[in-house]
Image (cartoon, rainbow, N blue to C red):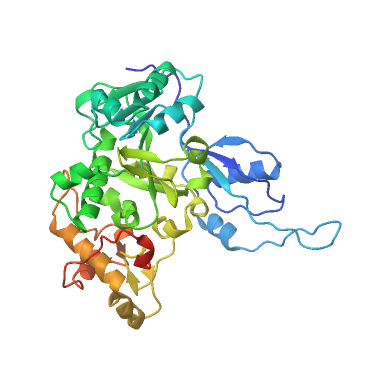
Amino acid sequence: GLARPWSPPLIFVRAAAMASPGAPASSGTAASEIASALEQRGSEQEAEYGRSSPSRGPEAKDSRSSPSRSPEDSRTGRARSTTAAPVRVTVLPPHCRVLTVGDGDFVFSEALADARRPMNKGLLVATNLDTEKEEVAKYAAAQGRLARIRAAHGEVICGVDATRLGDGPLAGQAAFDRVVFNFPLLPVGRILSNGARGSEVHLENRALLVKFLESAPTVLADDGLVVVASKDCFPYSWWRIEAMPEWSGGKLALAAVLPWQNTEYPTLYDGPCNVNRDAAVKPTDAVIFVFCRAEDRDRHCLPISQWCRGFAGCHPMAPSPGPHCCPICKPGGLGLLSAKELAAHKAGKIHKKRAGLEQQWLARGGVGNGASMSGGDSDAASCNGHDVGDDVGVARVPPDVDSPRPEKMNK
């Protein structure tokens, strides 16, 4: 296998801007302490994400909840702002071994190889489902792009199925520190060949990602991470990527959902990423999902302050959404004030469509080996023990959820 003289960093954090010296730490974790120290020095440096388990004791809780007095400006006598600076998270450190999956026209893999120059051999393996002959025939720039990746010491392997990573062309490869799937989307031809129509298209794409997450641990290093870039808007948000670890067998856990702009992605990739001749996905409304091995979640889970606000309810330290909760219309659960409000929400058009989609998902049975569809034990799929299965029954008719204009869905 590949000689690996040192263990690569997990996740790096960077202070995106300076904070005031008196600013309180946003979390008791090692990551936030490092970021806070860097900000207090007034410098923009990079630090390794702490390998120790995040502190979750009373001291950490107090540090988050206790207000601190803002220091005064010596010239004006007014309180200076102590708003914490955004933290830049590097999910693909330069010395980690990366596998890119389903990279379409390989534009992301080329950008990553270029950003890492000079790059040692073995640190990047770029893959796609098409054969190389099909790739070159499909994309006009493919031949030159593949040549440039190889010239930068990247390896290109075509014909790799994202749902069967341990088999086929990747068999015998050394383990990867990062497995990356950017903007996953089934080609139209594959969807049509499966006979999917309407809401079934969403389920086909959901099933693709569930099988990918089931397969990823077979090629993932012990301390590795799985990274999925997707979009937080209809229809992608209806795939419920945050709930997929439970459906894929529980070997992985959600470690973070990061804002696109708080990672290195904007410097690498400005889209569009072509997934077929006439289909492209642009990184608008994009978020970065990070998964780790389930047993390592306490070590890899980033502070809730660094997560996308819309996914904070999925964080293990997030407060309960309460007893009046819809578990499917918001990541981590949509908390409402009363049973009356919850009943009104369930009677709404959008909830019924989403519940109908979940009903279809349950009816499909298991995806992959041993995946549970009920979601009853998943934090992302239940509210205080209230199972998704209790909600899907409200949809009595097949939902119409294949509107091409997500802004009409009134999410």
Vertical order, 239 against 188 (above or below)? below
Vertical order, 212 against 83 (above or below)? above
Task: Inspect this view and state whether residue 145 appears.
Answer: yes
The percent coordinates of residue 174 (x first, y second) are: 31, 22
The percent coordinates of residue 29 (x first, y second) are: 52, 47
Using residue 114 as the reference point, say whether residue 252 is left or right of it: left
Vertical order, 150 against 80 (above or below)? above
Task: Inspect this view and state whether residue 387 appears.
Answer: no
Using residue 235 as the reference point, say whether residue 397 is left or right of it: left
**Nearer to me, 361 or 283:** 283
Residue at 44% x, 19% y is 152
The residue furthest bottom is 340
The percent coordinates of residue 16 (x first, y second) are: 61, 44
Q: How many marks?
A: 0
**Nearer to me, 107 or 204:** 107
The N terminus appears in which quarter of the rendering? top left
The residue furthest right is 75
**Nearer to me, 65 or 195:** 195
Residue at 39% x, 68% y is 321
Vertical order, 314 against 272 (above or below)? below
Quadrant of res 68:
bottom right
The percent coordinates of residue 304 (x first, y second) are: 48, 54
The C terminus appears in which quarter of the rendering? bottom left
Quadrant of res 397:
bottom left
